[in-house]
Amino acid sequence: MEELSKQEKDLKIAARKIASAKKVVALTGAGISVASGIMPFRGKGGLWEKYDPAEVAEINRFLKHPAKSWIALREIQEVVEKAHPNPAHFSLARMEGMGFLFSIITQNVDGLHQEAGNKVVIEFHGNTRRLVCMECRALYPSTEIPLDTLPPYCPSCGGLLKPDAVFFGESIPTAALLQARVDVQQCEAVLVVGTSGMVEPAASLPSMAKSNGAFIIEINPEPTALTSSIADIFLKGRSEEILPKLVDELGILKEK
């Protein structure tokens, strides 16, 4: 009988930990959406190589020069609207459907978890598939608002529209922050997927879970600051390849 590799053994351990946990939470970052064609804003090839975030995604600059900001924001909208969930997103949706995943806390603004079928998604940084009026706070699907003329304005009150995402200088939505903290304090296992764990306040959530006894499973292409500090298992690889294998292991356990 062929001996299992360390990765295969770790996959089985991770699946058993998830299957035996009463509550499992996933924390996802930009890495999970790369296979969907959405590059991380930071790093090589990221949008911030082309545009200065302090110019286009800082709330006060946006309010002063909305047309200039919207040149970059329109490009983001176009990329997101063309994107579709990849196998990593669908795997997390399957986990939820199988009863193995309670919620997803995501730093992404692309809405792909919901499109894949997940019902409980806590959006830390909002969602660019919605536009919000800065005056009356009305929300609109981004596909319903033409961006031929910039900046766009609210059809109801004429106020300035912005993507319903958290800009630099804005706070994380209170409800999202509170619910995320409740979930990580109560969970018994956390899946950290596609995030380096560097951006606060999301970066503190795995440590918060760990301090309450949760088992931490990290899935990333390369080691991060979390790998050697708090991860109990590190599954090295792309999330769109690792997560389907993990779900297959969970399916085997569910059938037993």
Image (cartoon, helix red, strand yellow):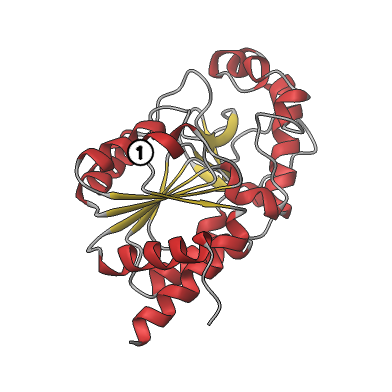
Q: How many marks?
A: 1
Q: Is residue 127 visible?
A: yes
For disc 1, the neighbor class at 10 Å (few under 14, some 14 to 19, many from 20) is: some
Image coords of residue 234 (percent x, y) = 47, 49
200 lies left or right of 61:
left
Residue type highlighted by circle 1: Ile
Above-or-below relation of 123 to 189: above
Above-or-below relation of 37 to 23: above
Image coords of residue 76 (percent x, y) = 70, 38
Instruction: Give 158 or 146, whichever is nearer the viewer.
Output: 146
Quarter of the rendering occupied by the C terminus: bottom left
Question: Is label 1 in a helix, a strand or a loop?
Answer: loop
Image coords of residue 55 (percent x, y) = 67, 15
Instruction: Give 225 or 27, whichever is nearer the viewer.
Output: 225
In terms of image quadrants, where is residue 42? top right
Q: Which residue is mark 1?
A: 230
Q: Residue at x 38, y 29 (%)?
A: 201
Residue that sits furthest to the bottom in the current view: 255
Instruction: Give 252 or 184, whichever is nearer the viewer.
Output: 252
Image coords of residue 53 (percent x, y) = 65, 20
In terms of image quadrants, where is residue 249? bottom left
In terms of image quadrants, where is residue 78? top right
Q: Is residue 116 visible?
A: no
Q: Residue at x 52, y 40 (%)?
A: 195
Q: Residue at x 67, y 59 (%)?
A: 84
